[in-house]
Image (spheres, grey):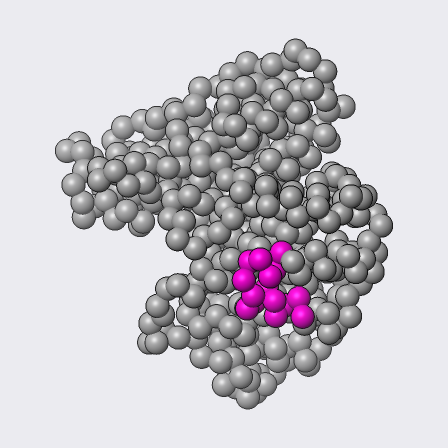
Amino acid sequence: MTDRPAGYGALSEQILAADYRNAASTFCGLVREEQPVRDLVMHSIDAAAPFVQSPSHLMQKPDGTVRGVNYDHTILGWRSSLKIARRMGGRAAYLPLTQAIWYAPQGLSVWDQLLCDFPGHYARDQEQCDSREHPPEAGPFDGPAWTPPRVYFEDTEPVTDGTPEDRIQRMTLAFMEGRREESYGLFLGLADKPEHRQAVKDAVLFAGIIDLQDTLVDRAAYQNIGHKALRARAMCDIADDFGWDNAHSLFYTVIPDLGTAPRLHALWSTATNLVNMQFPNSATLKHENTAPMTERQIDETIDIILWGLQGEVLAHISQRLREGKSFAAITDATLLAYCKYVVDVVEHPNALFTPGHAWDYCNVVNSWIRNYDNPHQVKSLYFQAAFVNDVIRANRQFPQDPAMAIEPPGHYREWADGHALDMLLVALDQAILAQDPSRTIALVDSYLQRTGERQQLLSTLVFSACRFQNDPHVQRHAITALEEYEHHTTSRRDEIIRAA
């Protein structure tokens, strides 16, 4: 648009230069000029889209071993910030959006960041490139950049030959086989027609959900911890909000990556075999299984996910399906297992990072089950339970520093109860900002037991989450908690608040 303020051009330049401080300042200046948030977000995504692809998520090191390459998180930041902003309203709604634009310039060209060839979050914090050998022309890895970001996947033309059904099947297979240009072209040809979009979204979410490692234990680089599913949902949500006719940069950001190596379908194969052998009516189980779980059955499911081996977990999901338990009952019990792990089992702050990805992955699966009707959805119940169980078992591999141990929240319950109810949420915000999980949970528990009010509590948790800059995991976890709290079907949904 030729009538846009000059700040739009400056914003593009600052994003591509990894000049995140000035990009955030320019973004906020345009907000103050009352530029539409939708236009600013899409402009930012447009600028970044060609530069968030990686040639692979596996990188060979000089010694011949392979390391993982991080997935693009810029689109995840935009999705969570938009969802939260809509719920917050008022001036506070700009806080999560500012966090998203603060991160976005730091998330470009991840492949080159890992090589210390481009500045940003991974080069500065993860790789600590400022303390390593790097290109002689390189400046500080906090930015701005001394070289343009690289394009590792060129945009392509739509593919329109064949029936829509045929093209969706070809696209799905192309994702699984890593034919990136073909899958992207097929997607573009399908996304152009409004009548195809529901089926296309279903297929894209399906492709992201089934591409998941069978285990993190001893897998090193051969994992994705659910990022393909998370990014597929982010694309669908933002396109639905802003309109598919103007969402090409969203598609360019997400779709080519669904076919990028590594492609991990061993768990998909296992779940398919289990379902095919046991449930000839698998395609209709979602509508036939309607029974809730008893409290005792919920506890049994939680225990097996917390302490069982993967084979035991998968067998348990089959048992629940044979008992006629609804998909919602099974997915809710899986989430409660995660909640119990986070609140009652985790002993070290570092142990919260990877499980959080399973939390958000479960939310993607649940949203898919709630909003689509795919004959393969029964298999995703196995994926959820296996993923939550696996991150728990993987965490046990790592030694914990006793000096960093999380104190039991019960130690602070008397302290929490000493706060007046009308001041308790203020104390909660302070405890979160201090990153004190023990006092945070004690305050939440005190609030839950002293009042039936929940919305102010949830709003406090979400607002506090938006005050952290973290490529944007905390905001993502917060919107997952909000969504799952609203849809939870058991009497234990307050456990979601405790885990949030």
Q: Where is residue 495 in the image (x, y as percent from the top left)?
A: 64, 69
Q: Does the magenta stretch include residue 302?
A: yes
Image location of residue 98, percent across then percent down? 49, 46
Q: Quadrant of residue 25?
A: top left
Can see residue 150?
A: yes
Looking at the rendering, in which quadrant would you find the C terminus?
bottom right
Q: Nearer the viewer, residue 132 or 318?
A: 318
Residue 123 picture quarter: top left
Above or below, 303 against 469 in this view is: below
Residue at 31% x, 49% y: name it. 126
The reply, left or right, for residue 500 in relation to residue 293 is: left
Who is closer to the viewer here, 69 or 195?
69
| Position in image of residue 29 (x %, y %) | 47, 39
Report whether 469 appears left or right of 144.
right
Q: Looking at the rendering, in which quadrant would you find the N terminus?
A: top right
- In the rendered image, residue 67, in percent from the top left (x then y), is placed at 33, 42
Tell me if residue 480 comes above or below residue 341 in the rendering: above
The residue shown at (55%, 31%) is 176
- Relative to the observer, which residue lies in front, 496 or 277? 277
| Residue furthest out toward the top | 161
Whether residue 92 is visible to the viewer of this picture, yes or no, is no
Going 40% across and 32% down the picture, which residue do you hit? 56
The correct choice, above or below, for 297 with respect to 153 in the image is below
Instruction: Verify whether residue 183 appears in magenta.
Output: no
258 versus 283 height, above or below: above
Q: Which residue is drawn at 45% across and 60% down?
A: 394
Query: Which residues fall within the magenta stretch?
Result: 300-314
Work out which residue is located at the far front of the displayed protein and give it: 277
Q: In this view, does 335 lie to the left or right of 25?
A: right
